[in-house]
Amino acid sequence: MNNNTISIDDNQIGHNYEPYCIVEVGLNHNGNMDIAKKMIDEAVNAGADAVKFQTFQAKEFCGDPKQLFTYKSQGKEVTESMLEMFQRHELAPENWKDIKSYCRKAGITFFSTPQNRSDLDILLDVGVPAIKIGSDDFTNLPLIESYAETGLPIILSCGMSNLAEVNDALESVGWFDGYPASLLLCTSQYPTSPEDVNINKLTTLRNAFPGLVVGFSDHTIGSEAAVMALAQGARIFEKHFTLDHNLPGPDHWFAETPDEISLWIKSIKKAFLMLGNSYVRPTESEGHNRVEARRSVVLLKDVKKGEKFSEENLGLRRPGDGLAPSLLKNIYGLSATRDLCLGEKVSLGDMTK
């Protein structure tokens, strides 16, 4: 049996539930706990449901110490050792305990993307309600299978992947057998240009895997893509943010500021409210307008008892609290049962054959 909802810290997440918004700290704490805590505060102020970090030990996933990494920072292009860059942003196990405690006191859910099983073990010791797997490890099926041994809800980003790889990842995590997993549409391009977002992929994913909880890992600038993703069924949202675009580091320049991330969350929540329900019927707020704007059958001139109703003496005028316009032609040829005055609304008791 496939799950069509997942639960994170007692938050039910699925197609019929409110969107779940995750703000991604990622590397943007710059290895500084004061910055990390300030970002948690800003996440709370923005209305986020969860704040997410990245947990890693650089030497365990950067194999070549000579491998170079080029990125944009503070308006300049920077090239440096990938290993050294990640080591600068690495946090110690005791830091994660401090972050988890700070999030708990601030009233926001904490979880993280572990780079390896050893990193996950650190997070399990700290205590996390879910696991996030990034697009870089989406085809790392042994790692996915290992993470699924925890039984914790798993959120997978599927950037750079095709539909067959999505199927393989969902099979590895156990989703087809009911494991609580969700899938985030993602384009691994920072920032993602409009022509590469492809929100329509969400429809493909929902059709290919009915019941799967889908979401959107948003690497675009602004809120438009997230709002469109919501309309296509996304219910989990994730976006990078920073305290300042001008801080040094690889991700600050394209991440959202606190004000921008707040607007992003508000836009998603407002769009969900706008979805409403699928029942085609007047809303409660339309009740007054329904009467005020629509028309009723009324007399265009005085009519005597016994006189026949016709196009000459009947018409349609506001308000719409009398007989509906759809009945007008059926009244033609019937006779008035009493004297009626110009402008008077006609009722069923006013006519006979």
Image (spheres, rainbow, N blue to C red):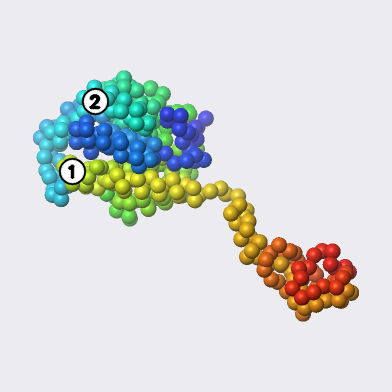
Residue shown at the point (26%, 29%) measured from the top left? 55
- What amino acid type should be assigned to the residue bearing mark 1? Leu
In this picture, residue 7 sits left or right of residue 309: left
Q: Residue furthest top?
A: 125
Q: Position of residue 133 (x, y in %)?
A: 33, 33
245 sits to left or right of 200? left
Q: Residue at x 42, y 29 (%)?
A: 9
Residue 30 in view: yes
- Residue furthest to the bottom: 312
Which residue: 15% across, 50% down?
Answer: 75
* Coordinates of residue 267 in the picture (x, y in percent): 40, 49
Q: Does the image show residue 187?
A: no
Name the residue nearer the viewer: 245 or 198: 245
Where residue 183 sits: x, y (%)? 40, 38
Is label 2 in a helix, a strand or a loop? Answer: helix
Q: Nearer the viewer, residue 318 or 265?
A: 318
Sequence order check, earlier mark of 2 and 1? 2
The residue to which callout 1 is attached is: 247
Q: Does 129 sit above or below residue 191?
A: above
How far is the residue under mark 2 from the one under mark 1?
21 Å
Q: Is residue 318 above or below residue 73?
A: below
Q: Quadrant of the C terminus?
A: bottom right
Instruction: Tell me: 313 left or right of 31.
Output: right
List the residue tagged with mark 2: 95
Quarter of the image where one finds residue 131: top left
Q: Residues within 10 Å of mark 2 (few under 14, many from 20)?
A: some
Q: What kind of residue is marked 2? A: Asn
**What is the count of numbered marks?**
2
Measuring 53% from the left and 48% from the top, which residue is drawn there?
Answer: 276
Tag 1 secondary structure = loop
Quarter-wise, where is residue 126 in the image?
top left
